[in-house]
Image (cartoon, rainbow, N blue to C red):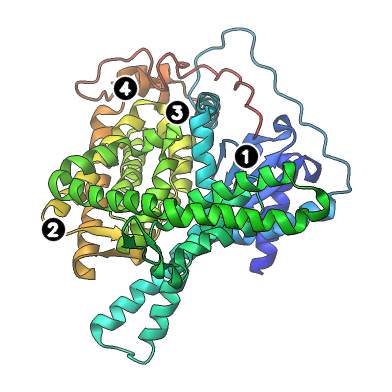
Amino acid sequence: MAENKNRALAAAILPLVGGAANVTTVVHCMTRLRLGLADRSLVQDEALKAVPGVMGVVEDDTYQIVLGPGTVARVTPEFEALVEEERAAAPAPAPQPVPASAGAPEPHPVTAEELAARGAEIKAERKARNATPLKLFLRRIANIFVPLIPALIGCGIIAGVNGLLTNLGWAPGVTPALGALASGFMALIAVFVGYNTAKEFGGTPILGGAVASIIVFPGIGDVEVFGSKLSPGQGGVLGALGAAVLAVYVERWCRRWVPEAVDVLVTPTVTVLVSGLVTVFGLMFVAGQIASGIGTGADWLLENTGAFAGLVLGGLFLPLVMLGLHQALIPIHTTLIESQGYTALLPILAMAGAGQVGCAVAVYLRLRRNASLRRTIRSAMPAGILGVGEPLIYGVSLPLGRPFITACVGGAAGGAFIGAFSMLGDTVGSTAIGPSGWALFPLLAGNQSLGLLIAVYGGGLLTGYLVGFLATYFFGFSKQMLSDLNADVDAGESGEARAEAEPTDAAPDSPEAPDAPGTPGGPRPGTPPAPAPAPAPSS
């Protein structure tokens, strides 16, 4: 039954993205089905968003369909099977675009569909701005670590269960085995990073893994560099990343100059030898110093400026996501998990999602007559509580403009709450990256008891919910926004009619903003959104 449901969802998605002939690549991360498309214009965005089970769409270097954790892992194989079955069929005809209105229409209530279109416009503009060499490089780094997230989550949860059983003195015959299950992947994570790095940068994946395996080989402890012996694992994932990139360039050089007759013998040997020696006598030491500095810096930051650091990180995380810079944090998280057993930064950053949830509740209550937008919020709220924030961000807060800012205020407050406890010596961390919201509870770890960690993290979530709600309810709307948005869309009631029918419930100290909702200079609510700019081609 579950298999039929997943196949039905895949079958509903496929024709709406242009059919099998339009799909070039299919991968998935923790929450999204990521598709490479030959022709972006064949995608029916609005119809796709209306499919039950689809939480939203995000356009980046790939076309990403948000399905949620668990679901995406089950739908992706079904989707791939359908693509293979229909590969020989003719591509579906492109849907006829709806012509834009030529004249200036009468003001009408802003619907959830228009807000979603506005969010898509913002996303497309951001994608064009983000296509810089630095941000494209950061995406490649993210592509190396994202496939590792399921193993990090599984091993992290097992580690948490094992720690609980050990502290309670239960099942002593089982806890050593659980400890091995939880630690095995982390002991060899450098190998997986090396494999994925070589694959991402165009080399032979197994050679990248072979070079990176030197870092975790126990015998490396017999090698002396700069007057001191190396330690197995020294440099960790950063060293593996550098070693694999070097291996890719050495391999390319060999492919260019080594005769084909001996290429199969010479190229792998020279690649492993040269990059391996550089790794042993240089990269391991340098990467080890960097990894140690990251751990020391994170500890100092939270111990000495915890509340302020939490406020800044929690408040600015979503803008970092908008700019594509959040991907630089993934190697930092992984390095902290590898060296300390957990990352103390992720629970603080997760507060950004709490601010979004509080903001959405406030929007729901303020816009009581906008049935269309309220339906969007109701459908996206469960995913938002579990840490999947894209539907709320791109469907509600970001296209509205000012509520996105007040949601960030809620995230800042939640981050400051957790950061303040770090200053008091109660550090809350996560044994894996990826989940947030309530889904992070099973992965909590730190320097205190599990009960205290749960209480601190839960208190941060409640703070983010509350401040995000209050900031949005009282400061998230101008009079003009309420007039345009707070109307019964299903009944066709206009914002002007709503304003004449009863006094506008204006937010205190919220003057009319000519550029709200939306980004500065964006379209005013009550007019159809301009056609989205042509998306940049997928890399």
Amino acid on which the number 3 mark rests in the picture: Pro
Give the foreground label among 2 and 4. 2
Quarter of the rendering containing residue 82: bottom right
Give how far across and how far down residue 150 sits, in percent. Answer: 50, 62
Give the foreground label among 3 and 4. 3
Q: Is residue 238 visible?
A: no
Q: Residue furthest left?
A: 424
Taking the spot 70% from the left edge, 53% from the top edge, the residue there is: 267
Q: Residues within 10 Å of mark 4 (few under 14, many from 20)?
A: few
Residue beneath label 3, please? Answer: 399
Q: Residues within 10 Å of mark 2 (few under 14, many from 20)?
A: some
Q: Is residue 245 above or below residue 512?
A: below
Taking the spot 62% from the left edge, 39% from the top edge, the residue there is: 63
Q: Is residue 57 visible?
A: yes
Give the foreground label among 1 and 4. 1
Q: Is residue 473 above or below residue 375?
A: above
The Cα–Cα distance between marks 2 and 1, rounded to whole angstroms, is: 43 Å
Give how far across and how far down residue 8 sits, in percent. Answer: 70, 57
Amino acid on which the number 2 mark rests in the picture: Gly
Numbered tag placed on residue 425 in the rendering: 2
Left or right of 244, for residue 350: left
Residue beneath label 4, please? Answer: 502
The Cα–Cα distance between marks 1 and 3, rounded to whole angstroms, is: 19 Å
Give how far across and how far down residue 386 sits, in percent. Answer: 40, 55
